[in-house]
Image (cartoon, rainbow, N blue to C red):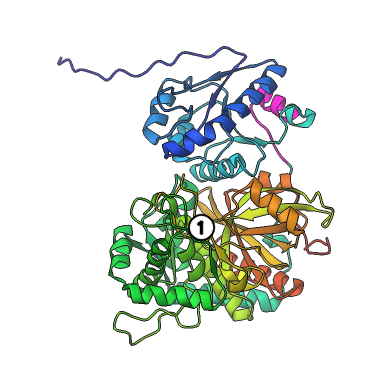
Amino acid sequence: MPTYQLPTLPTPEKVKKNQVLLVASGDLRLSANQDCWPAQHAMEQEIGKAVAAAGYEVVRAHPYKRGEKHGFISSQKEGMEIFRKMDPTAKLIVAEAVWQYSHHVLAGLITHQGPILTLANWSGMWPGLVGMLNLNGSLTKAGVRYSTLWGEDFSDAGFRKKLSQWLDQGTLKHRNDHVQALAKIKVPSAERKLGEALAEELRCNKAIMGIFDEGCMGMFNAIIPDHLLNPTGVYKERLSQSALYYETTQVSTEEAQAVRDWMVEHGMKFITGPNEQTDLTDNQILLQCKMYIAAVRIADDFGCDCIGIQYQQGLKNLLPASDLVEGTLNNVQRPPVKSRDGKRVLYRGAPVVHFNEVDECAGLDGLMTYRIHKAMGQPVENTLHDMRWGERDPSGTVDDFVWVFLISGSVPPAHLIGGWKGASSERQPPMYFPFGGGTIKGVSKPGEIVWSRIYIEDDQLKMDLGRACVVKLPEAETQRRWKETTPQWPIMHAVTYGTSRDQMMARHKANHIQVAYAKDADAADNAMLAKAAMAEAMGMKVAICGTRKDGSAW
C-alpha cells in the first residue's frame, strides 16, 4: 500500500470556559489603521471591563503589531492565518470602533462554530457602527448566525445586561415589532398597478447595471449574485476601472474646463489652495471633470441604465476621488456631456443613476427609485448615505432622535439647501486620497423622504422600506455634527418615523441607506408603497418599517 504525505492541519488551543476571544477587523490602508488604532484600543479596554464585570475574560486572538503600530487585522490573508489558530468553538467578539473591511474576517467567521457577537461603539468620529452594519449585512448574506450589540457607554447597566445575556446564553435578540410584511399592508390599487407594471417592463425590456470592477472595501453584502439579479430584468456590464482611467486621459482640458465653468455659473464654490498634498487644487478639479465626462461616455457606450464607480480603493493611486463626479451624475441639472463626435448630448435632461462604492444593492434600488419617481412626477434624484451616527438634538429645536446620514460620493446637489448654490467642494482627507479631489458638500434640505435598503438573506433578495423627514437644525448644531464626523462631506439630518435608533440598528443589514425626496408627506407615502409593490413584483420579500408621519400604522 503506497504511503503519501498528508497535510498537517492546525490544532488550535482551546480557550477556558470563562474566556471569550476578541478580533478587530481594520482597513487595508496602513495610514488609516494607524490613525484609528487609539480609538480601537480605548474601546477594547472598555469591553474588557464590561466582560470582566460579567465574570468572563477577554483574550485578544491576535497581537498588537509593533512594526505597523496598530492591532487590526489588515488583510484577508492575515485574517485566515489568525482564524486557523483560534479555537473554533469559542465565544467570539468582533469589536469595531472604526470602519472595517468585512472580507478580512468573513472567511473565518463563516467557518467559526462558536457564538459570534458583532460589537460597536457609538461615535460619529470613529464610525464603528458603520463598519459593524456592513459586517452584519455580509454575515446575513453568507448565512452566518450572529448576535449584535452597540453602545456609547459600555458601563451602562442596560448595555451590560445585554452583553451578559450573550456571554451566558450565546445569543441576543432585539425587538423588531416595528417591521411589517408587505402582505399585511393594503397597498392602494393605483400604486400597486404602477409598481407591478414597472416591474413587468423591467423584466421585458431589461436594463444594464455598469460595474466598474466588482467589490469595494470588503463589502461582500454589496454584491448581488447574477442568479438573483437577472430574474429582476437587470444584467451587469462588467467594466474596468482601467477603462475609466484611460477614457479620463482622453478628455480634453477645454471640455473639462467647460464642466467646471458650468458648475461655478450655477453657484458651486470650490475651496482651493496651492498645495497638492493638502489642498484642493485646480488640477484635481479638472481631472474630476474629465472623469465625469468619461463616465457618462462609457455609460452611453454600453447602454447603461445605472453605473457604479468603486471609489476609495479603486483609482486612488491614479486619480483624485470620484465624489464630485458621482453627485453630479445623480443630478438632473448637471453639465451637459456630448458624445465624442459632438453630435449628441448624452442622457439629456436626466441623471446617470450612480451608486457609490459599487454597492449593487444600492444600484438596483436607485434604478427602481428613478423609475418610480419619474412615473409619479416626483423628484428623481436619489442617493445612498452611510448610517453614520446620531443623537437627540441638544439645541431642543427637534424633539426627536436625529440621524446623521453622511456619505462622500453620489449625493446630488438637488438634495441640498440651495441646490448648486448651496454646494461647496473641499478636498478629501489625504489619509484616504493621496491625489485629493473635491467633494460636494452641503446640508440636505428639509422635506419628506423615503428610505430603503435591498439586502440578501437566505439566498433571496429582500427590501426594507420606511418613511422619514429631513429636518433643519441650527447652524451651530450642524457644525458640531460635521466636526464629530467628516466635515468635508454632505450631511443629512433625518428623523425616521416609528423606528427608533436601536430598532434601526437591530434590523438594518447594511452600512448604507437609500434616500429620495418627495413633494409632500402623502406623495412620499405613495411613492414608498409603489416601490414596495414593484419590489414584490420583482420577486423580493418586502417589509415596511415604522409608521406614517402622524404615527399611525400602515
Q: Is residue 179 visible?
A: no
Amino acid tagged 1: Cys
498 lies left or right of 380: right
190 lies left or right of 535: right
Residue lying at 38% horizontally and 54% vertically, measured from the top left:
214
The foreground one among 217 and 294 is: 294
Region in magenta: 161-174
Vertical side of 486 occupied by 186: above or below: below
Image quarter where the C terminus lies is: bottom right
Examine the image and state in which quarter residue 229 appears: bottom left
Where is residue 467 shown, x and y percent of the image? 71, 62
Q: Total number of numbered labels?
A: 1
Label 1: which secondary element: helix
Q: Main secondary structure of the magenta part?
A: helix
159 lies left or right of 37: right
Residue lying at 44% horizontally and 38% vertically, measured from the top left:
31
Residue lying at 32% horizontally and 74% vertically, measured from the top left:
301
Circle 1 Cα neighbour tier, 10 Å, few/some/many (<14 / 14–19 / ≥20):
many
The foreground one among 418 and 503 is: 418
Magenta-drawn stretch contains 165: yes
Examine the image and state in which quarter residue 41 appears: top right
464 lies left or right of 254: right
Magenta-drawn stretch contains 162: yes
Q: Would you name the residue on which mark 1 appears?
A: 361
Vertical side of 59 occupied by 263: above or below: below
Image quarter where the N terminus lies is: top left
Where is residue 147 shown, x and y percent of the image? 62, 35
Q: Is residue 398 visible?
A: yes
Work out which residue is located at the far front of the displayed protein and give it. Answer: 274
